Image (tube, rainbow, N blue to C red):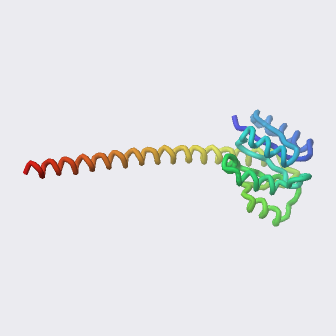
Amino acid sequence: MPAILIVDDKKINRSLLKKYLLHAGYTEIFEAENGEQALEEARKIKPDLILLDIVMPGMSGYEVCGIIKRDPKLKNIPIIFLSVLSDVDNKIRAFEARGVDYITKPFEFEEVRARVQTYLRLFYLQRELERYNRYLEAMGEEKIKEIYNAQVSTIYAIARLAEKR
């Protein structure tokens, strides 16, 4: 079951999102009320998705996202920004911070559910692709060794044949 981290300084927003996600069948839902807590929780649980508010006291959502994206262990976690800020500049800034999506508050449950589902699916597909690439690299290395050994054996056999002649 995917782990989802909700980060918002307003308890009502966290509760509402958690209720929506529980209703959609997600059971591993974690909460943080500020940027520092978000980073602590993200490092502890390594969520599969983060729903991140932008305007929070202390550290903004942009700052939290930047720190997460610089952390090698967390950088691939998809982050969906949630904000009352609906202007284009803030949306662009969210995407420049490497967020995957931007939902304007007040949000519709079906929109949140659909986007969460989409980005979780993409996250798992990306993870599977990375695993498959590692498998192919290992197979490639194994085949290279086999070819090398076959070439060495062929050279040795040709050398022995030349000696006999």
Q: Position of residue 74 (x, y in %)?
A: 70, 47
- Quarter placement of the N terminus: top right
Depth check: give the residue in front, 159 or 28.
159
> Looking at the image, how many numbered discs can be counted on the residues?
0
**Residue 50 x/y as whole percent:** 76, 46
Q: What's the residue at 9%, 48% (across, down)?
A: 164
> Residue at coordinates 79% horizontally, 39% vertically from top-left?
21
On the image, the x and y values in percent for residue 11 come to: 92, 42
Residue shown at 75%/59% (left/top)?
Answer: 97
Above or below — where is 2 with respect to 129? above
> 137 or 23: nearer the eye?
137
Q: Residue furthest bottom?
A: 89
Q: Residue at x 83, y 52 (%)?
A: 82
Q: Position of residue 23 (x, y in %)?
A: 80, 35
Q: Nearer the viewer, residue 88 or 52?
A: 52
Residue furthest left as drawn:
165
Q: Nearer the viewer, residue 79 or 60?
A: 60
Q: Residue furthest front?
A: 163
